[in-house]
Image: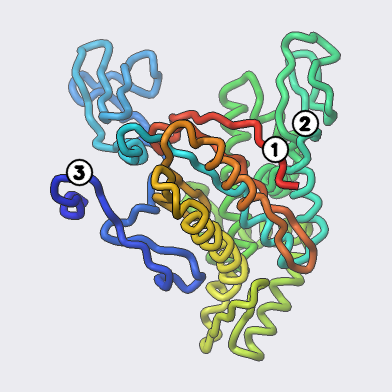
Amino acid sequence: MMKTIKVKETIIHGDFKTTGTSSGRLSSVNPNLMNLPTDAGAAPDNCENCKTDFKEYVTVDADRTRSRWKCRKCKHVTRTYLYDIRKMYKPHVGYKFAIADWDAMEVSLMAAVSGCPDLANLVHIRDDESRIVSHCCCLPPATGSKKTCSGCQNEAKFSPDPAGDLHTVTGAKINAITPQELFLLMHSDIESTRARGKKMRKGAKPVNFGIMYGIGSSGLATQLRDAGIPTNKAEAQGMIDAWYELFPGVKTHVDDSTRELNANKYLKNIYGRIRHVPYTDDVLSALNFLIQGAGAQIAKKVCVDAAYSFIDEPDIRLVNLIHDELVIEYKPGLEMDVAQFLFDKMNIAVPGKQTIHLTAEPEVDIASLSKSEKGKVLNLPSKE
């Protein structure tokens, strides 16, 4: 990475390739500026000097930015060399970042492409801001739009309806509970119960994205084991069967697309882009193209629009596209122009067997790409 820094600039310039992936996504090399870890890693298990257990954070002072973990007992500093790489991504002096990424883009695209009504309903629940769930010490979770708890008034908390979260719905299904019950586990006051609920939802992620692309039981079992969830082939097949019970329309789409691929040796996505697949052992990659390829075209179109929209504004420039996340650098005072552009170009309707809307909420006034940074959301007028 150090070799890529330009002389006198102290800036890393990567290369972006438009034809580096079979799905159509942009790729980045020299170095890869898109493959960014989301955090600085967990604390070490114990102090390397006195062996004090670091699992309880009361025993350690953490400096994640510099990967330093200071033991409160012996004062020794243990280093893991796991850094917050995203914090290195900073705008030029006198500038700020604006970022925006699509909310569960691939789930929305699958709903549009497959025409699955059950998945489309989940997306509509997710995007309905009035669908909130109240939960507090005196009431079970309840769906509604009230902003105050009818029980204790003061202690109410509100969250999006779990029926609109794919990972929660899937995690509940494969564990034979309801989404509301899993929601309760994840928000329990008991730490072990809360951890169990979060593990169920986390385990649903490889299930969701693997199955949407037609993965088999062996492949899913491998992915779950890699994610730290011991699973055998029979258990993985049970998860696949349960998932298709939730979203039978996706199963129909996968079967139809596979037959089309075997017959024609190519597939065409919703925007007309064709992927030739001469070998039948590349079915998963081809199915992936139908979703990621469409998403890639949408993202690259926004990049092109940014270049033309701000061609006469030197203080606004697109600096990175991290998969589904756009990063624009701007000089303070221009944040409304940038945020409005991102909102208008990224909140769009996607054609398919049914129309689904993609949503994105831009954030401005960001000093780095670290997940610890919190931006501002502006009150923007709708483009309609």
Q: Are marks 2 and 1 in contact (CB under 8 Å)?
A: no
Question: In the figure, residue 126 lies in which quadrant?
Answer: top right
Question: Outermost residue toward the front?
Answer: 312
Q: Mark 3 vs mark 1: which is more N-terminal? A: 3
Q: Position of residue 245 (x, y in %)?
A: 78, 59
Mark 3, residue position? 10
Question: Tag 1: residue type?
Answer: Pro
Mark 2, residue position? 132
Mark closer to the observer (3, 1): 1
Separation (CA) of disc 2 from disc 3 = 47 Å
Q: Disc 3 on helix, strand or loop?
A: loop
Q: Position of residue 184 (x, y in %)?
A: 71, 29
Q: Residue at x 56, y 73 (%)?
A: 284
Separation (CA) of disc 3 from disc 1 = 39 Å
Category of crowding for the residue at label 2, using alpha-carbon neighbours closer than 10 angstroms: few (below 14), some (14–19), many (at least 20): many
Q: Which mark is residue 381?
A: 1
Q: Mark 2 vs mark 3: which is more N-terminal? A: 3
Question: Tag 2: residue type?
Answer: Ile
212 and 34: which one is in front? Answer: 34
Separation (CA) of disc 2 from disc 1 = 23 Å
